[in-house]
Amino acid sequence: MILSFIFFMILFLGGIWLMGLAQSLEDFQAIVFVAGLLIVSLSLAFVMRAQGSATRRKDNWSGNATE
C-alpha cells in the first residue's frame, strides 16, 4: 500500500512538474504539456484501480454490493 502511494505521488508530481516545465521551453511546449497531463491522469487512474480502494462497489462502507 505504501509503495503504491509512493509510486502514485512520483507520477502525480512528475506530471505536474512536466506541465510547469512546458511553460519555459522554447520548442515542443504542447507535447511536454500533454505528456504531463497524461501522466497525471494515469496516476489518478492507477490510484482509483488500486485494490481495496473506496471507489470499488464491493468495498463500499456499508458492505452491501448494491444500494
Image: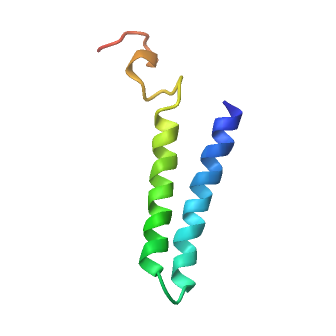
Vertical comparison of 29 with 36: above or below: below
Q: How many marks?
A: 0
- Residue toward you, 27 or 57: 27
Closer-to-camera residue (57/62) = 57
For the C terminus, give its image quadrant: top left
Name the side, left or right, on which 2 lies relative to 65.
right
Question: Where does the image place residue 35, in percent across and percent down from the top left?
Answer: 47, 65
Q: Nearer the viewer, residue 57 or 42?
A: 42
Residue ID at (48%, 46%): 44
Quadrant assignment, res 8: top right
* Residue 28: x %, y % from top left: 47, 81
Q: Which residue corresponds to the image point at 45% horizontal and 42% vertical from the top-left?
A: 45
Residue at 45%, 62% (x, y): give it. Answer: 37
- Picture coordinates of residue 22, whole percent (x, y): 52, 78
Residue 67 position (above or below residue 8):
above
**Quadrant assignment for the N terminus:** top right
Q: Find the residue positioned furthest to the top.
A: 64
41 with respect to 67 (left or right):
right
Relative to 42, residue 30 above or below:
below
Q: How was this image coloured?
A: rainbow
Residue at horizontal 43 percent and vertical 29 percent from the top: 55
Foreground of the two, 39 or 64: 39
Extreme-left residue of the structure: 67
